[in-house]
Image (cartoon, helix red, strand yellow):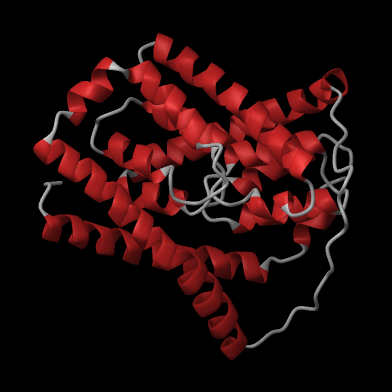
Amino acid sequence: MTGELPDILGEAVQVTALVFAMMVAVDLVNTTTRGWLSAVVQPGGNRQYVVAPVVAAIPGCLGLFTNVSLYLHGIISFGALTGAMMAGSGDEAFVMLSMFPRQALALFALLAVMGMVFGWLTDRLVPLLGIHPCAGCAEPAVHAAREGFRHYVTVHVWRHIIRRHLLRTFAWTLGALLVVGLALHYGSLQSITSNHTILMLVLAGLVGLIPESGPHLLFVTMFANSLVPFSVLLTSSIVQDGHGALPLLSYSVADTVWIKVLNLVFGLSCGLALYAFGY
């Protein structure tokens, strides 16, 4: 990637087009399989620690939103939701698949496994930390599903994918590409990131606390340009969850804060350990 504006704009458009295609494909799968998770997950059982992170690891925000809904209905535990938030990457997952597909798939698999382990561990830490899960939750209303191609295109594709996600993804992707591309062209970003890797790792964790889909793309873009090692990308991926935490935030601020803090601790610990081994 060069630092010239036409090249950066063209790459942003190409990435966004791929993201759109993948978003529609994943949304179709989610729509046709809606409701089966409640039957698969056994409330309070160990199966939730496997199912929740695997569903969350599916690219996009739908898997994360599904887990939040299951949690608010008492189907999965606080730990399972924490593991799911760790495993999920939101819309940034589509961008990673378009930029470095093989590494992205490996990252998603690793995040899912880590979500299983740390989800189980979190539930064991809940009483020790004095956490009271979902103390202020109010069960969300269940709306009847409406079917039909016109409804799907209007609601799912136009309102949800294009208006709420695609335009925002394009803006964040273009911004990240501009920052990295121009910094490489006019500055010394490579020397800064290589000489201050631990600082970048900590910064990645702190930026991941933002409950928004987009800031993580800065570290995705830097990894794609070999400016930061895998440990930095992993740290950012563990802490951030796209905007999957936003629905939970509207029901329980305390739970959202606890999940973010726990995943920050997990993310920095795993990232620093991986960096110590040369990754």
* Residue 65 on image: x %, y %: 67, 56
Query: Which picture quadrant has residue 113?
Result: top right
Name the quadrant of the C terminus.
top left
Is 39 drawn above or below residue 52 in the view shown? Answer: below
Position above or below: 118 against 221: above
Residue 96 at x, y = what percent? Answer: 38, 46
Q: Quadrant of residue 115?
A: top right
Classify residue 120 as left or right of residue 204: right
Disc tally is 0
Look at 46% across and 49% down and name the residue there: 93
Up the image or down, 277 lies above or below 62; here it is above
What is the x, y in percent for residue 12?
Answer: 27, 59
Residue 90, percent from left and from top: 53, 51
At a point 57% along the width and 52% down the height, the residue shown is: 243
Q: Is residue 177 visible?
A: yes
Question: Which residue corresponds to the image point at 53% horizontal and 83% vertical from the top-left?
Answer: 153
Question: Residue 231: in sight, yes or no?
Answer: no
**Relative to 3, is 150 above or below?**
below
Q: Name the residue nearer the viewer: 32 or 180.
A: 180
Residue at the image position 12 percent from the left and 61 percent from the top: 6
